[in-house]
Amino acid sequence: MRILFRVLGLVAGGLALALLGRDLFVLAQSGNWSPIDVGALWWTVHPGSLQLAEPAIARHIHPFLWDPVMLTVLLSPAWLALGLVATLLLLSTGRRRGRRSRRFGS
């Protein structure tokens, strides 16, 4: 499980850096800061699931979870959200405690 979380954290971190690079490129080209938000990125990747998420969350879980919690997440910059996910995943894996493995000598 540790390896899976570490790989997912590294992938999310790479995506966060790529999105930050995209936002900085747009800033250099246009002169105004307009980072892509999570909702716009989600809409670009799979619009149908975004349209189904609101009624599913509001009806089946709790309306408070959609507004304001999910709306805040959807309006946050995508690089920041993915960077936070990557940080949490990588911190959750941690380092092994104890002695090093002696499989390969010494």
Image (cartoon, helix red, strand yellow):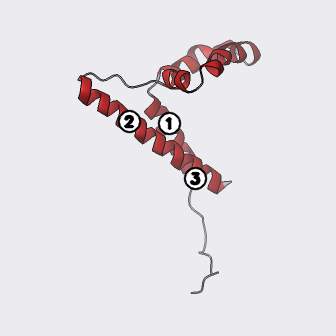
Q: CA distance from mark 3 to mark 2?
A: 21 Å
Assess disc 2: are there few (<14), some (14-19) or many (≥20) residues with their C-alpha within 10 Å of its C-alpha.
some
Where on the picture, by quarter, is residue 71? top right
Instruction: Read off the residue under disc 2.
Output: 20
What's the amino acid at mark 1?
Leu
Task: Please tell me how many numbered marks the rendered image carries.
Answer: 3
Instruction: Read off the residue under disc 3.
Output: 6
Q: Residue furthest right?
A: 60
Question: 54 or 91: which is nearer to us?
Answer: 54
Q: Are marks 3 and 1 in contact (CB under 8 Å)?
A: no
Q: State the residue at coordinates (60%, 24%).
A: 46
Q: CA distance from mark 3 to mark 1?
A: 14 Å
Q: CA distance from mark 1 to mark 2?
A: 10 Å
In percent of width and height, residue 100 lies at 59, 75
Q: Considering only order in the chain, which callout, 2 or 1, is on the residue closer to the N terminus?
A: 2
Q: State the residue at coordinates (31%, 28%).
A: 26
What's the amino acid at mark 3?
Arg
Instruction: Read off the residue under disc 1.
Output: 82
In percent of width and height, residue 89 lies at 57, 46
Q: Position of 75 compared to 100: left or right?
A: left
